[in-house]
Each structure stands twice: as C-alpha cells, then as structure tokens.
Amino acid sequence: MLKPGDAAPPFDLPCAVEDRIDRISLAKIRSEMVVLFFYPRDFSFVCPTEVTGFNQLRQEFAEENATLLGASVDTAESHRRWARELGGIGYPLLADAGGGVARAYGVYDEKEGVAMRATFVLDSDRKVAYALASPINVGRSVAETLRVVRAIRTGQLCPAEWKPGMKFGPPDRQL
Amino acid sequence: MPLPREPSEKRRLFDRLASVREVVFGMQDGVLTTAGVLAGLSGAVSNHSQVILAAIAATAAGALSMGVGAYLGTSAETEVLRSELERTRREAAERPYIMQEALLRQLEREGLAREASYRVVELLSSSPELLIATTEEKVFGLGGALLGNALLDGIVMGVAFIAGALIPLLPYIVITTPRIALGTALCATALALFGVGYFEGWLAHREQRWRSGARFLLIALGAAAVGYVIGLAISPLGGAAG
C-alpha cells in the first residue's frame, strides 16, 4: 500500500457521475487535493453508508478544493445503476474493472478479487498526503477524512483531534 | 410416462425418505445379528426352543439398543444443530448486514449476477425470518430439514430391527428340524439382504435394481465373513485362557 510521500500512480478510467457515463484522468484534475477512496463492490449491504456519506459531504470537500473520487472493480454501468439505487451520487465512481489501479495503489485483495477499503488524500503535487486502510467489515468515517483534508491544507502542525479554529503546534508545556 | 410430482408432494416424499437410513440400518442389523445368533446357538445348544428363546431375547435387546442409540444420536445431533441455528439467528438480529452480505456472495458464487443477487437479498430482507432461513440453507448448509425427529428415528430403527430379525427367526419357529431350519433361515437372510438393497435401488430410481440388491448382499455377507474369520482367528486365545 502506498504511504505518505509516494507519488500517486496515474489513472484514466471510465466512471459514472450524475447518472451518466464519463471518463476521468488523474492528470486532468485541477483541484488542489484529490480524495480517492476504494470500496469493495457495488450492490453491497455494507458499502453504501460510505458512498452516500461522502456524497452528503461533497460540498464541504469542494469548499476545501478537493475532488472526491470513489473506485471499485465494478463497471461504469454498474456504478450508474448502483448510484441510482442510492438516490444519486454527485461525484465520480471510477470503474477499475480488473483492479489495475487498486493494485497500483497496493490495495487490491487478490483472494477476494476486490479493492480493500482504503482512502488516499493526494496533494497538489499528486503525492500521497494521507493513506488509510480499514478492515472489510468496518466502514470509514467520512467526517474524519474531511478533517484530515482540512488539516493538511493548513500546512501547519495539527495536534490530535485538531479541528478548524483550534490552535496549531504542539500543546503548551510548563517548563 | 408418470406425471411429474407436485412440489408439495415431493416435499412429503423427502420427509418420508428421511427415515430410509434407519430402516436400512435397522433391518440389515436385525437380519444379520439374529442369523448370527441362530447359527451360533444351533451348534452349541441342542434344545430347539432354547435357541428360539435366546434369539428372541437377543432380538429384544438388539431392537432396544438400536432404537435407543438412534434416539440419542438424533437428539444429540439435533441439539447441536439447533443451538448453532439459534446463535446464527441472534447474530442476524444484531448485525443483519453480515447475513445479507454472506447470502449475496453465495448467490453470486452460484452464478447469479451481482445486481440480481442484491435484488434477491433485498427482497428476502423484507421478511427477516425468510432471510435467515435462506441464509442458513444456502450459506451454512443448515436447514430445518436437518433437524431430525429423535423419537421417530428411535421407533423406526427399533421396529426395522425387529422386522429384520423376524426373517431368520420365523423359519426356526415354524420348522422343527434344526438343520433345515438353519438352512432356511440363512437363505431367508440372504434374500432379505438382497431385498433391502433392491428396495434402496427402487427408492433411488436406479435402472438395475438387482445390482443394488447384489451389492448390499455382498457387503453384508462380506462383513459377516470377516467377522467369522476374526472369530476363528481369536478362538485359540479363548481356549488358551480357559
């Protein structure tokens, strides 16, 4: 799995976005940050909370100049139908059929033939700024991903549980 | 050409066939054990009625032992299965998505497309009981049908044993000449063993049922012959000890 500081492997994949099929290339994304999250499969009873969770906060991510991308090994058509099923998803779901991109990011589960639950935040140089993998049965916190994006964008030393408005730097110590 | 069976009729047939194991096992054991007792006692005891009484006692003990054994065996199996099913149900109530996901993957593995599997599971999820029952059968291979009736199994096994025992025993009761009675009993035993195999072949709709009969007869007689040879082999030990 890629770690902070690694260059993000490029990709150019079909995707489903707002009920249409399109294509998206990492090289053509102009936003400052990119949040790329992998999930195992469409039409699942575990994943929808994450996919819809990111959708609910997509405006907040946009305000942080971050492009949201979801990816799984399903086809773009499957993504389109799955997004409809979930009531519409306003960010692209990448069709990583075959799992080539998941492999490049080191998050492909060869045994199951699906991507792991993994999240990457890419910086403006398209290097990995943050990487996280969750067990297959544990959903991620979308709010935590947003907090991390905000923290990275400050360029400051953010202590644990930092939130916008809080002090930067290490906690004060009495000498 | 026979008409295809109605599904409900087929279900009743499957329920009845669940006792085939007990019938075959009980009859086979009843026939062979009693024939063995009669053959053994005929050589050792000269009084014909004593042989018959001993064989009847052995039949009663054997039927009880087999019936109780079947009852206890099925009880234990049912108890373990039932507790496993209850545990699965508790898990399903707490985390239904685990069960939904497991069933979805199983349906996909069996050839249904991902989306179709999802729709099926979603539909089944509208009835939690149905979702649980389907998951138990498809994913865990545990079905309500596996929960046997211990009392019925015990009774069927005991009755089958007695029915099997009567086959070699009746010639002994009817025929008073020991040698002829033994010969008739052994012939009846062989015929009965063949008959049980033939019956099993008939139930399984096999083309060559006589093969099933011959196979059953050979296996049973083979086991009896091995037992006889072992008895012969260890008999000097008994003599030495005495």
Image (cartoon, coloured by chain):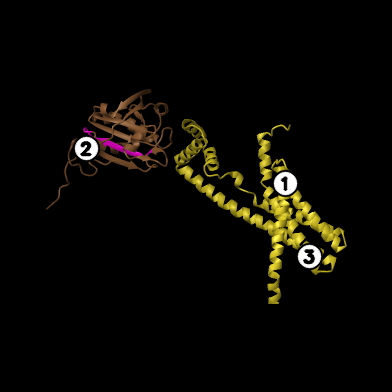
Q: CA distance from mark 2 to mark 3?
A: 92 Å
- Residue found at the very far left of the displayed protein: A175
Q: Is residue A116 magenta?
A: yes
Mark 2 element type: helix
Question: Which region shows up in magenta?
Answer: A115-125
- Residue A60's place in the image compared with A112, above or below, is above
Residue at mark 3: B54
Please identify, in this view, whether the residue under mark 1 or under mark 2 is nearer the observer: 1
Q: Are the residues tagged 1 and 2 within 8 Å (C-beta)?
A: no
Residue at mark 1: B211
- Residue B142's place in the image compared with A58, above or below, is below
Q: Are the residues tagged 2 and 3 within 8 Å (C-beta)?
A: no
Q: Position of residue A57 (x, y in %)?
A: 30, 31
Q: Is residue B167 magenta?
A: no
The earlier-in-sequence mark between 1 and 3 is 3
Mark 1 element type: helix
Q: Colour of chain A?
A: brown
Q: How many marks?
A: 3
Q: Amino acid at mark 3?
A: Ala
Residue at mark 2: A152
Q: Amino acid at mark 1?
A: Arg
- Residue found at the very far right of the displayed protein: B176
Label 1 in the same subunit as label 2: no
In the picture, which quadrant includes the N terminus of chain B?
top right
Q: Locate residue A108 relative to residue A125 in the image: left or right.
A: right
**Which chain does the residue under circle 3 lie in?**
B
Q: CA distance from mark 1 to mark 3?
A: 35 Å
